[in-house]
Amino acid sequence: DIQMTQSPSSVSASVGDRVTITCRASQGINSWLVWYQQKPGKAPKLLIYAASSLQSGVPSRFSGSGSGTDFTLTISSLQPEDFATYYCQQANSFPLTFGQGTRLEIK
Amino acid sequence: QVQLVESGGGLVKPGGSLRLSCAASGFTFSDYYMSWIRQAPGKGLEWVSYISNSGSTKYYADSVKGRFTISRDNAKNSLYLQMNSLRAEDTAVYYCAKSRAAIALFDYWGQGTLVTVSS
């Protein structure tokens, strides 16, 4: 099974800050990496697929990069609605696996 | 617009069974692969099972293999998860999710249904 490891597990930041979250796969997954955002009590929302493709309707302040085993999600200028938990997921092979999540909190 | 509505969750004793349903609308259900994903209270996301658009191909997480069965009825635009031999560690919110073509990513999710396994 492919293990997905996110860092940090939590981060505190302020509105307007630039934040980067990393996700590392235990083996190469090409660009089969997906990012989701989840707010408390809500279902996850697709943000980025194929490592760097922005889902329709997602603000352009979100971006993704990477390939192989190392990936990043960057939020260029945090907005109040961005405080949430972020998950990466590998879509390369079964069993599908998620990272443990990164909680983005208001400083 | 795409809608996925789960039902069938509830309280069940260890060793018991439960069948979850997911009613889909707003898209051609028979064209898309579907999955179940769960989230234990206060924990992260765990993929559970995946089914092809025709129902001919199915995948399961090791944690549920042999106990859970995914199925679909394309005529009824519905996805199912039959859960047998339930354990306390199966307690979670269960989401159904639509995949994009045959790619194993989830572009639409239901609101989830809570399954609690407890005596």
Image (spheres, coloured by chain):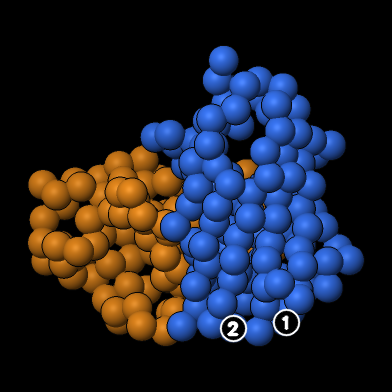
Chain colours: A orange, B blue
Q: Residue at x 58, y 47 (%)?
A: B8
The kind of secondary structure element at disc 2 is loop
Considering only vertical position in the picture, is B8 above or below B84? below
Q: Which quadrant of the figure contains the C terminus of chain B?
A: top right
Q: Position of residue B115 (x, y in %)?
A: 54, 37
Within 10 Å of disc 2 (Cα), the crowding (few <14, some 14-19, many 20+) is few
Residue A84 tag number: none
Residues tagged by mark 1 and mark 2 found on one chain of the structure: yes
Residue B14 shows up from this direction: yes
Q: Percent from the top left, x then y, of residue B10?
A: 53, 36
Residue positioned most to the right: B56
Say which of B91 and B43 sits in front.
Answer: B91
Q: Are marks 1 and 2 in contact (CB under 8 Å)?
A: yes
Q: Residues within 10 Å of mark 1 (few under 14, many from 20)?
A: some
Residue B31 tag number: 1
Report the amino acid beneath label 1.
Asp
What residue would you read off at disc 2?
B27
Using the image, determine if residue B28 lies above or below residue B56: below
C-alpha span from label 1 to label 2: 9 Å
Give the chain letter at badge 2.
B
Q: Secondary structure at mark 1?
A: helix
Residue sitting nearer the eye, B101 or A14: B101
